[in-house]
Image (cartoon, helix red, strand yellow):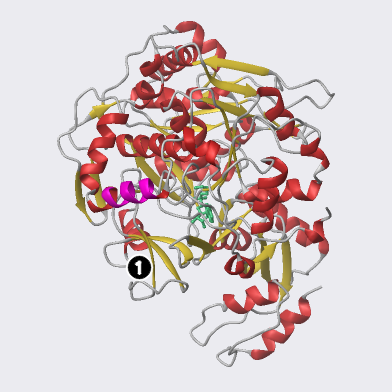
Amino acid sequence: MNVSSVPSANIESLSQESRVFPAPAEFSSASRVKTMTQYRRLWSASVNEPERFWKQMAEQHLHWFTPFKTVLQWKVPDAKWFGGGKLNVSSNCLDKWLGTATANKAALIWEGEPASDGRPGEERVLTFQQLHREVCRFANVLKRHGVEKGDRVILYLPMIPEAAIAMLACTRIGAIHSVVFGGFSAQSVADRIADCGAKLVVTADGGYRRGSVVPLKKNVDEALTIVGADGERLAKSIEKVVVVRRTGNEVHITEGRDVWWHRELEYVEDQCAPAKMDSESPLFILYTSGSTGKPKGILHTTAGYLLGAKLTHQYIFDVQDHDVYWCTADIGWVTGHSYVVYGPLANGTTSLMYEGAPNWPEPDRFWRIIAKYRVTILYTAPTAIRAFMKWGDEWPKKHPLGSLRLLGTVGEPINPEAWMWYYQVVGGGRCPIVDTWWQTETGAIMISPLPGATPTKPGSATLPFFGIRPEVVDDQGNPVPKGSGGKLIIRQPWPSMLRGLWGDPKRFKETYWSEVKGAYFTGDGCRQDKDGYFWIVGRIDDVLNVAGHRIGTAEVESALVSHPSVAEAAVVGRPDPLKGQALVCFVILKTGAKASPSLRDELRAHVGKEIGPVAKPDDIRFADGLPKTRSGKIMRRLLKQIASGAEIKGDTTTLEDLSVLAKLTAAEE
Ligand code: WT7
């Protein structure tokens, strides 16, 4: 199959989709929820009496040091779940299994990236008991360096077991982790440290990526020197840097500040009592892009988040004791938090972690790993599936994939063609697909099939999970008729919802709770079909979804205008066959600066440096002016049409300067 025949996530084709795939009988017979009647009954009960439902779930699924007294205290937009309760996340993921048959079962199976000289990747397996010990040891290292309850710790690591160990170690002592994806730049690390006032960074000498080394420690060194607008160092709150030795390349160690992970472990005990945390103690902060220039620090708290991650993981992947479960997300994203680490471990599931890229050294990496470990559940992103389609069927066909029994997708709408390919070529037509809709903010999956019950339709995330009430509404907040498009909102609070934006209650309220009174606004457009199935159309705010990564247009715009040659910039998305959306930037240069291919490269590199390689623009177009309304607002609709090469439609008479439009169109190459 060649590139041009791979269709993109195309909304038009979604609305015509009529295929239905019933849950396979064999799958249903062993699963937790077996029929739609059962699902409907449980779901109705859960949303009609949410407090009763969540109380029962929290008692049944979590281990409490002190039982909770209240289920929910709710005053828009502030929710308090399971008030009065005390628990610990690492205990629920690890201690819980000690002394049971699960203690010596693999908790993490880790596969390293193969070396560039052809040597196979390393392999490490940690049982629940071994992971428990490593977590206790590292928790003691954190304590030794003065990290206390409520302190913030930045984790800037490759996909190695130490990443999961460090996350769990933070939860053990009640420190708040903030994982920064390894594809973000030194500047991004510094901004995040400044925002949350972190005390300590855990990083590695480097991380392997397609045979080369990502210099993580070097980026941290640079981050610690960057000066902010007030003339002070952005990262001045950092006292210590713990460095994992991964690649063995040379790094600079600043005496008194930097310490080696492996050396530190020599000084500590392997026992560490879990801190008894309140249900609502902050658990982690994860930064994500919004529609303004500054990333927002999404805050999740202890009990509600853990319950959401555990319950959804158990029901939606219908995990069984023998499963080898592989979620391919990096722990730098929320998917890695909920479905590589917390959900699976809380369920006693073996979670596979892979360090590298899907096409290194060859495009069969995933299939090789599935065959090697007999993976039974695979959870990945549509953008990866479209890339696999492009690379050709011969790669998956080379490996026995018969161990697979369930497939999942997340991150963006999946186009029916990619869905069908996943179903047939990867799943051999046997495996149900769970298309799971959720967000960093929701903490856990919100809309998804239950694989033993829900008939699936390619491209639809289908129906809400227990306790979740999504609705499609118009601008006034009224439900739209079935079949019409609208805004996706969530009517009632749920335990794993975000509790705020770190240090910015005003933005929290404005972004999520002001669009429709009393309800949570997702930022997504959506349509419900006659069967009540939800079809997500994508973001309706100024946020793009590029290869499953969330990128704010305003963030890229502010990175561009920070370059000395740029006067003004507007960034929009264009449909892309592989990445879902591609980043197109319209750039107005300052007087004296000259448009050239080398300046284009320089600007791309500049954005990469400011934000990180994930945000590098696909396309930069120089223009003399931007189309604006009389009030000075950039006409993004028009730019989107120009970017995607579409014919200009609609009313353009409000343009400040019509000639600008002509110039812009002419500037296309
Ligand atoms: C946005 C959230 C939380 C998972 C990783 C992304 C889009 C996510 C789906 C899906 C259609 C989806 C939405 C959402 N999205 N899953 N199954 N179908 N769209 O997390 O970076 O917080 O992005 O991803 O637009 O709002 P995120």
The residue to which callout 1 is attached is 515
- On the image, the x and y values in percent for residue 459 come to 58, 58
Instruction: Tell me if 102 is positioned left or right of 592 in this view.
Output: left
Q: Secondary structure at mark 1?
A: loop
Q: Which residues are magenta?
A: 37-45
Instruction: Tell me if 149 is positioned left or right of 114 in this view.
Output: left
Q: Give me the residue at 48% from left, 14% from top.
A: 134
| Quarter holding residue 220 | top right
Tag 1: Cα neighbours inside 10 Å, few (<14), some, or many (≥20)? some
Answer above or below: position of 247 versus 510: above
Answer above or below: position of 649 versus 164: below
Furthest residue to the left? 69
Q: Is residue 44 magenta?
A: yes
Q: Is residue 467 visible?
A: no
Q: Give me the residue at 81% from left, 20% from top.
A: 119
Q: Is residue 604 magenta?
A: no
